[in-house]
Image (cartoon, rainbow, N blue to C red):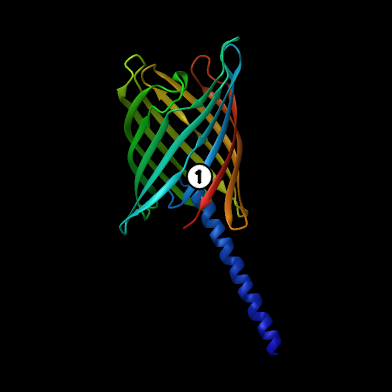
């Protein structure tokens, strides 16, 4: 009887550990869909765009996007989101030269309440544009700044909301075009009990200087897995450009790897 009791306690302890691991994974999958979650993450987002210009050129962009939260007192978090692009662009003209290097960095700072506000997770703050491009045609050679904000809800596996910002230039090369651009990213995602997430979003930009939209529609699938104790998310998907500048891409592919560092 004593042996049977010990076996039962061990089994229950094992079940409890499994339930705890399941709950932790579910919470992690949920935080993955929140751009201002209290979670350190390092996504490396690889994008291929096709059909650019008369030469039907390809442009590859690897966005390294670390997200780092900082606790400010009992009620607030400050979340930094940095996008550092590494680019290889084929010439859009036949016989032209390809270009590779770094693009301009965009960095956002979100001040966010630790508790939801009326069921909504919200945050806002400044966004900055740094002229870090290594080649003239990979960036705008302008310093920029503006406001950014995000609002989202999460319930019953669903995540929906919008992230937006606007950038104006305030310094930089006088020979390059001014920057006045609004970025809007509405998103809708559903996460299953196996930590698979289907997501639909747009990453739309309105260029006020040239009065034109760029509207890629993205459909992706993401899977959260663990390698030992290290959680990693893999994302694959495609995009269609519903609106674009003349000579812009027709369609694209995305593959992302996100390293997660839960506290």
Q: Position of residue 198 (x, y in %)?
A: 58, 43
Q: Nearer the viewer, residue 257 or 164?
A: 257
> Going by the image, does 82 lie left or right of 221?
left
**Image coords of residue 78 (percent x, y):** 35, 48
Q: Quadrant of residue 180?
A: top left
- Residue furthest to the left in view is 170
Secondary element at tag 1: strand
- Image coordinates of residue 10 in percent, x first then y, are 65, 78
Residue position for label 1: 42
Task: Say which residue appears at 44% left-offset and 45% top-offset.
Answer: 67
Judge by depth and name the residue closer to the eye, 91 or 51.
Answer: 91
Marks counted in the figure total 1
Residue 17 shown left or right of residue 159 in the figure: right
Residue 260, position in %: x, y?
A: 52, 50
Q: Quadrant of residue 149?
A: top left
Q: Which residue is drawn at the image coordinates 33% and 28% (left, top)?
A: 144
Q: Mark 1 packing: few (<14 Cα in 10 Å), some, or many (20+)? A: some
Q: Residue at x 37, y 52 (%)?
A: 70
Q: Quadrant of the N terminus?
A: bottom right
Q: Residue at the far bottom: name it.
A: 1
């Amino acid at each position: 009887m004593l042996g049977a009791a010990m076996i039962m306690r061990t089994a229950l302890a094992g079940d409890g550990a499994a339930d705890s691991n399941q709950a932790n994974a579910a919470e992690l999958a949920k935080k993955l869909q929140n751009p201002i979650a209290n979670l350190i993450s390092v996504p490396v987002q690889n994008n291929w765009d096709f059909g650019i210009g008369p030469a039907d050129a390809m442009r590859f962009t690897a966005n390294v996007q670390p997200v780092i939260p900082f606790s400010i007192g009992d009620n607030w978090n400050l979340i930094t989101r940095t996008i550092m692009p590494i680019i290889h662009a084929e010439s859009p003209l036949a016989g032209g030269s390809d270009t590779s290097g770094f693009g301009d960095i965009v960095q956002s700072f979100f001040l966010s309440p630790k508790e939801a506000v009326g069921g909504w997770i919200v945050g806002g703050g400044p966004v900055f544009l740094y002229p870090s491009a290594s080649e003239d045609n990979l960036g705008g050679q302008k310093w920029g700044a503006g406001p950014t904000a995000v609002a989202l809800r999460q319930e019953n596996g669903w995540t929906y909301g919008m992230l937006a910002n606007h950038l104006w230039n305030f310094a930089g090369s006088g020979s390059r075009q001014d920057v006045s651009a609004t970025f809007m990213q509405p998103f809708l995602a559903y996460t299953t009990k196996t930590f698979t997430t289907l997501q639909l979003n747009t990453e739309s930009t309105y260029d006020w200087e040239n009065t034109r939209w760029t509207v890629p529609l993205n459909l992706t699938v993401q899977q959260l897995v663990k390698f030992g104790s290290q959680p990693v998310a893999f994302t694959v998907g495609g995009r269609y450009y519903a609106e674009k500048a003349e000579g812009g891409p027709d369609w694209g592919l995305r593959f992302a790897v996100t390293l997660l560092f839960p506290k």
